Amino acid sequence: GAVVSQHPSWVICKSGTSVKIECRSLDFQATTMFWYRQFPKQSLMLMATSNEGSKATYEQGVEKDKFLINHASLTLSTLTVTSAHPEDSSFYICSARWPWETGGILGEDVNQPQHFGDGTRLSIL
Amino acid sequence: GQNIDQPTEMTATEGAIVQINCTYQTSGFNGLFWYQQHAGEAPTFLSYNVLDGLEEKGRFSSFLSRSKGYSYLLLKELQMKDSASYLCAVLDSNYQLIWGAGTKLIIKP
């Protein structure tokens, strides 16, 4: 079954609207989540790495003031596309990895595969 | 720079075998992943190789040669549902995942 849940699946809205996308890890806690964007017939492009309790790490060329990321809990990260425009229309996907835990300390197991949410198709009119 | 190469598109026949190659040049290596992505859907994990050799999982197998910077995904007994894009991704020395552009596999009856 799914290990990462993403909501909503589809969003169609007017230019200038802000859109929030939620990513939840199911049955595990994720200290780190990843946000990707994918344009038609292109590969995944990492936008940012979301870190629980701290600021997200953005990839070069991604505007952090436009793509706001909040990782307020160990099971939820949100991506808000602020003042969206037609060029922001894309497929947005989040992912997370199973954690390791030792001595009560939770960390990210970097050798685990990333498990993806179902993605959000964003269309800005 | 870091680079991962895969063929853009391949075509195969239902019931046959197909091999999708991936070559990489990355700053360090901590493992290689293969993902399947159907059109309009998110990727799903297929395999992970960190040591040289072949890993078999049902109809799918993945091979790695670290000295050659090379991997392949082997799909046997192809089914129509295997039509998808197959993404190769390498975990570099900083544990960043570097993605290939993907190989679109078309299965014909």
Image (spheres, rainbow, N blue to C red):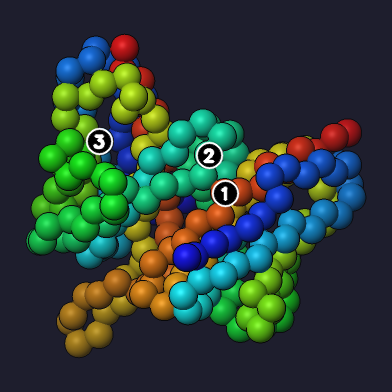
Percent across and percent down for residue B69 are: 64, 74
Nearer the observer, B18 or B8 = B8
Q: Residue at horizontal 51%, vertical 71%?
A: B26
Q: Amino acid at mark 3?
A: Ile
Percent across and percent down for residue A13 are: 26, 15
Measured in 3D between alpha carbons, the distance from the residue under mark 3 to the one under mark 1, in whole angstroms, is: 25 Å
- Residue A21, label in figure: 3
Is any atom of residue A50 visible in this view?
no
Nearer to us of marks 3 and 1 is 1
Tell if the residue under mark 1 belongs to the same chain as the one under mark 2: no
Helix, strand or loop status at disc 2: loop
Does residue A120 appear to the left or right of A30 in the view shown?
right
Does residue B12 appear to the left or right of B64 in the view shown?
right
Residue B4 in the image: above or below residue A83 = below
Is any atom of residue A124 visible in this view?
yes
- Residue A98, label in figure: none
Name the chain letter of the residue that bears numbered label 2.
A
Q: Amino acid at mark 2?
A: Gln
Residue B49 in the image: above or below residue B59 = below
**What residue would you read off at disc 1?**
B101
Quadrant location of the C terminus of chain B?
A: top right
Nearer the observer, B81 or B4 = B4
Q: Amino acid at mark 1?
A: Ala
**What residue would you read off at disc 2?**
A42
Helix, strand or loop status at disc 1: loop
Percent across and percent down for residue B91 are: 46, 70
